Image: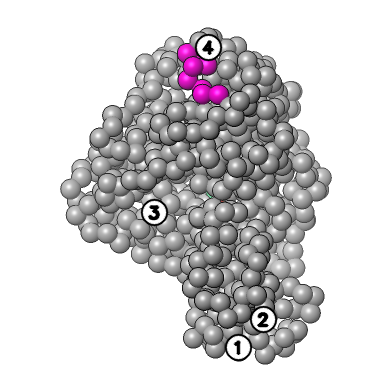
Amino acid sequence: MSNYHIKDFEEYFQVYRKSVRNPESFWEEIAEEHFLWRKKWDKVLSWDFSKPEVKWFEGAELNITENCIDRHLATRGDKTAIIFEPNDPKDPAEYISYSELSNRVNKLANVLKAKGIKKGDRVCIYLPMIPELAISLLACARIGAIHSVVFAGFSSTAIATRINDSECKMVITSDGSYRGNKTINLKEIVDEGVDQCPCVESVLVVKRINAAINMKEGRDEWLQPLLDVASADCEAEVMNAEDPLFILYTSGSTGSPKGMLHTTAGYMVYTAFTFKNAFQYREDEVYWCSADIGWITGHSYIVYGPLANGATTLMFEGVPNYPDWSRFWEVIEKHQVNQFYTAPTAIRALAKEKLDYVEKHDLSSLKVLGSVGEPINEEAWHWYNDNIGKKKSPIIDTWWQTETGGILISPIPYVTPTKPTYATLPMPGIQPALMDENGNEIKGNQVDGRLCIKFPWPSMARTIWGNHQRYKDTYFSAFDNKYFTGDGALRDEVGYYRITGRVDDVVIVSGHNLGTAPIEDAINEHPAVAESAIVGFPHDIKGNALYGFVILKEVGEGRDRDNLSNEINQTITEHIGPIAKLDKIQFVVGLPKTRSGKIMRRILRKIASKDFSNFGDISTLLNPDVVQKIQDGAL
Ligand code: WT7
């Protein structure tokens, strides 16, 4: 049981060194001792970043749900697997034991089978944060279907694009969702999307808000009556280690969203190992990650990682400010949460409110505080540390990506001394490298560069669904024989990493990775818009907000600018979802472009953040005079 749970800093270095010297025996030992296999592997790892091709535990057979559920039944059958805390605090919480989870997953798995879903088929899941969401992921995994969760805040167009890209045969959704004092008619949004998806044969609907909805004859069915008659026994499909587990879409700087494909064994081993260590989870503790399962954070650290460790994981349906801003702290007190994992954007929003909201709750159960999604600024870090952790709970600033499957750089609480704004040190098995623009690795400390990873780790995405070339181009072409993260980072005098942000055209807003291109495409759909460019600019709460520079067509000239701005945001909401709305829109006569026609975003970024000091060399621009004109308009 040597490497699985690291207990002090010395042990961290020992384990880390071992994981780098001999990655294969390191991961093999962990896989061997802590998981249930139908058949062991023939080979621990084979890899070639030039193809790129990575295979972990080749030849092994398993089912991840047997690891997340069945093997706990003998010893933890009555233990709570999932605590469901509903949107309305007046509604009772639900406590789902491992044996109940087993029954509910198996029943749904049988329903999916009866509807013709087989191993390898894709199922789109578009659900709010209710138990059926976690259960749907697991039911797919039970029968070897590949789940593709679409965050239930995305628009019908976004759903349709994702469903069609991976040709999902089925959609699991609900009649609607609660969000604070609002309800959202999810089924209507799904209907609009699925109308454009010939591949969808059936839609299963969970009843959540009792909304009157349309049910399309022959396609749509309420889920509950099917579950009522389903058997609670469902033999797990035997999967190969490298069989796909799920697809999750993430936006890039250009083009359509990328369907990152994660496979079974490596993903399971890595998310379980990092959950145990990054949160120092111990039996009988209560863990809460406030993310939505629609993002990778929820996949890895609400569902798979915690359940693989037999943990109690809390799912929260609501929002931080309903009924008021004490909701998070109330949930922590009510369920005696030990590990709390959230995003800097939430911390900043909570920190703006009166401290009374925090102080009226007993937060003494907390042992570990986590942060994820974007760099956490110093002020937010201290507020979190002082007021929530009372300077006793270490903050783990966990850096990772949809593509990495699990946390790659993070302190281990009570093991790694923390430092505000630093993600600190790599997890065992992770070999970071900082690269300069010429493709050389920058060695030593007190340096900064582009963050790459030099060696495969078990939970890395294996490809982009349907487009392996794009996977190679995006992640393995910038630097020879290395995975390029797209982030910049610095390494301080002791070797701690600080992530400084994206070096490409991806903007992180409220911890969500938004590509500029899809948003610009959406803006350009507006009939009055000729061209547009968006950049991120600093925002108190969201970290980054979006600033749009828009060139109008003749039809837009003379129209009321406020109305136009509202319409543009409406267009974005329709095409992508409200998270991508622009905070500021400036109408401009032109955009600064290079001779090859590329928009010079660094200039726009400076203007958006009202930094007019030094634009650098603009002589290579096709239209240098436009810079002054945009600047004048921004003043
Ligand atoms: C991008 C990945 C991993 C789950 C949530 C986001 C940024 C993420 C941190 C952090 C600084 C961070 C990076 C990364 N990011 N965590 N702790 N410190 N930046 O997943 O949507 O795939 O976005 O989020 O820029 O590349 P994602």
Q: Amino acid at mark 1?
A: Lys
Pointer 3: residues within 10 angstroms few (<14), some, or many (20+)?
A: some
Residue 165, position as x, y percentages in the image? 71, 42
Secondary structure, mark 4, is loop
Mark nearer the viewer, 4 or 3? 4
Q: Earlier in the sequence, mark 1 or mark 2?
A: 2
Which residue shows up at 30% across the image and 38% down it? 88
Which amino acid type corresponds to the residue marked 3 in the rendered image?
Answer: Ala
Cβ–Cβ under 8 Å for marks 4 and 3: no
The label number, if any, that marks residue 230 in the structure image: 4
Q: Nearer the viewer, residue 575 or 211?
A: 211
Q: Is mark 1 within 8 Å of ligand 1?
A: no
Q: Identify which residue, 462 or 492, lies in the foreground.
A: 462
Q: Is residue 222 magenta?
A: yes
Residue 200 pos. (x, y %): 68, 32
The answer to whether the residue labelled 1 contacts the one labelled 3, judged by CB atoms less than 8 Å apart, is: no
Boundaries of the magenta span: 221-228
Residue on which the image places disc 3: 346
Q: Amino acid at mark 4?
A: Ala
Mark sitting earlier along the chain (3/2): 3
Mark 2 beta carbon near ligand 1 (under 8 Å): no
